[in-house]
Image (cartoon, grey):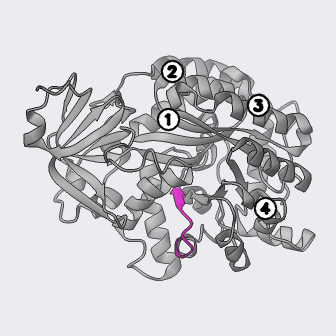
Amino acid sequence: MTPSPAGLIISPCTVLTHDDHERIGFERDAAIVVRDGVVASVTSSARAAELPAAERIDARGQIALPGLVNCHTHAPMVALRGIAEDLPTEEWFNDVVWPVESNLTERDVELGARLACAEMIRGGVTCFADHYFAMDAVAAVVEECGIRAHLGQAYFSSQGAQGREASLEFALRYRGAAGGRITTALAPHAPYTVDDTDLAATAALAREHGLPVHLHASENRDQAEASLARHGVTPIEVLRRTGILDTDVLIAHGSGILDRDLPLLASAAGRTAVATAPRGYLKFAWPTTTPVRALHDLGIPVGLATDGAASNNSLDVWESMALTALIQKSTTGDPRWLTSRQALHHASLQSARAVGLGDRVGSIAPGRRADIILVDLTGPHTQPVHDLAATLVHSARSSDVRTTIVDGRVLMRDRELLTIDVDTVVAELGERMPALLDRSHGRRIQDYST
């Protein structure tokens, strides 16, 4: 009996795999069979040649990886890329970014999100965790362009109860939207902008509705030390006493996590994860980075992230992967940590787990959603290939991604974006820049003071 045609067959290629112990490997001369947006099998290219398929991709000489996950960003902030350069954190927020963000309209957010999604799809990102304002507009862009996203409507305590209520309403309304490609979270901004009462209320809502929480905490060492000096507790201890650590929580940055915080994170009742975005920490000259090794030893997943392009200048998760590996070698004084294979694990399964999707994406295996990227390593900067993992982490670039697939749908083929018209977005965004960048009003959406 002839089997029904597969929706998509990708062959021949080398496929990144995970074994039962979550170690990285590579299966050569392989094929990926996709049915109904799900990986049906990873088989040999010879076997796949005999199978009928509605669509085939010739991936000869390419590497198939799970789509990358950007575990913490503010996608619409690509509209602010480069407006606040070479500034300390406090000036960056108070003098430039928060005054400009007071001008944001929903259309600005939509255009920024559209441009960000184009950048991420071209860079092999198939899922991103977004924490921003006017998130209905971001959800609409995700629905249209085909990417996967974990979305949260950010709020401050200065907004009153309505900020928290809007975050909940958004999370409930969009949970499971876009055919399941959208998942949601409650999104308080941070312990220094959201008070204990609001954090405790958020934790209660998360438990009541089965929602995770995504927030900034212990972003840098200054925040941790200021919290200790003013309140006698670290930001992580604030999360414990308000019940946030009893929920499933994604902590952005954590470069200020102290040794005293580690037992609290290890004993958290909920699923705890941390997102690291190392380029921004270097740019702000923060003295410490996310303690990846200590968190690893506790079994806490650390996902890769870029933060927003206003601070990071790009949404390039490949760069985050390489920088994470290099900075860990430097800060631990151990060239054997992080290895290239470990870095690829952070970029795949650990990042998927960080955003609560570890059972759906993060590996190319039967039953997983078909979020797949194809990487071309034939360029002179990636040749010769002696160690495939090292080549992917330390030599490959985001521009080496040839094809990006989400849920079995091709969003970019041979570097051509199929779901977003970048030229139109850039043209309209440019027209809106004078109004967006005006700071003469003297307003800001918040005051940054750790």
Tell me which numbered mark, 4 or 3, is placed earlier along the sequence: 3
From the viewer's perspective, is the residue at label 3 or at label 2 nearer? 3
Residue plotted at (73% across, 61% down) = 245
Near-viewer residue (450 or 145): 145
Residue 68 is covered by the magenta coloring: no
Q: CA distance from mark 1 to mark 2?
A: 11 Å
Which residue does the numbered mark 1 point to in the structure image? Answer: 148
Please state which of residues 344 and 182 is positioned toward the viewer in this rendering.
Answer: 182
Give the mark, 4 or 1, whose residue is nearer the N terminus.
Answer: 1
Q: Quadrant of residue 187?
A: top right
Q: Quadrant of the C terminus?
A: bottom right
- Label 3 is placed on what type of residue? Glu
Q: CA distance from mark 3 to mark 2?
A: 21 Å
Q: 332 above or below 62?
A: below
Magenta residue span: 296-303
Cα–Cα gap, marks 4 and 3: 22 Å
Residue 239's disc is 4
In the figure, 138 relative to 44: above or below?
A: above
